[in-house]
Image: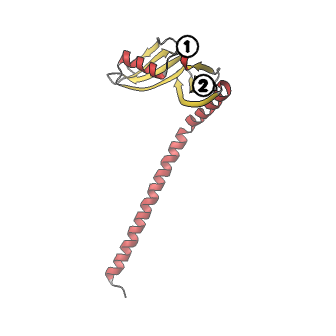
Amino acid sequence: MQSRREVQRERSRGTSKRMIRDLLILIILIFLVGWSIYAVGNHPKAEAERQATTIAKRYANLKTRTDFYIYNRENTYYTVAGKNNKGQKILVIVPQKNGSVRIVKQSTGLTEQQALAQVKSNEHPKKVLKAVPGIFNDKVVWEVTYLNSKGNLCYDLINFKTGSYVQQINNL
């Protein structure tokens, strides 16, 4: 016959095992819910990236993709950066809705690093958030988004070919 202590120890071990099992199930559930939310939230971007890359391969002979950008102003544009079958660095700018696909050789204009350097030199931002290529007033531009020294949001549009400022929106 078991003593009262032995019975309590066995119950205690059973309770510990159940608690560990329940904790593991809870952790797995939290992970699955988090992953599901991320996957559902990221699906439109992933789908846009896939479609833009397919168009870039078809229209610009894109062989290797290095970057993907989303530009939102009056219209939304998806840009795929990479190299074509001749080894040239290109940007393929695809409108979200109606419009024509633009293929731009990166050697004919500013690189992302040059656009960023220009804004850093002229505006002295506290933090640069992003630089994306897009179309503004039917011209290819780099949109550089940053926080100025006061922490306010700013947008600079820089002409891709000339490097001149097209538009500046400060202190939002």
Which residue is at 33% across, 84% downward? 3
The x, y position of residue 147, in whole percent, is: 37, 24
Look at the numbered disc 2 and give the secondary structure of its residue: loop
The x, y position of residue 88, in whole percent, is: 59, 23
In the image: residue 99, left or right of residue 161: right
Look at the numbered disc 1 and give the secondary structure of its residue: loop
Crowding around mark 1 (Cα neighbors within 10 Å: few <14, some 14 to 19, many 20+) is few
Name the amino acid, label 2: Gly
Which circle marks residue 137 in the picture?
1
Is residue 147 positioned above or below 21 on the image? above
Residue 135 visible in the snapshot:
no
Which residue is at 68% across, 28% downward? 58
In the image: residue 92, left or right of residue 111: right
Tag 1 near tag 2, CB within 8 Å: no
Indicate the quadrant where residue 79 lies: top right
Which residue is at 65% across, 31% downward? 54
Sequence order check: which comes first, mark 1 or mark 2?
Answer: 2
Is residue 136 positioned above or below 129 on the image? above
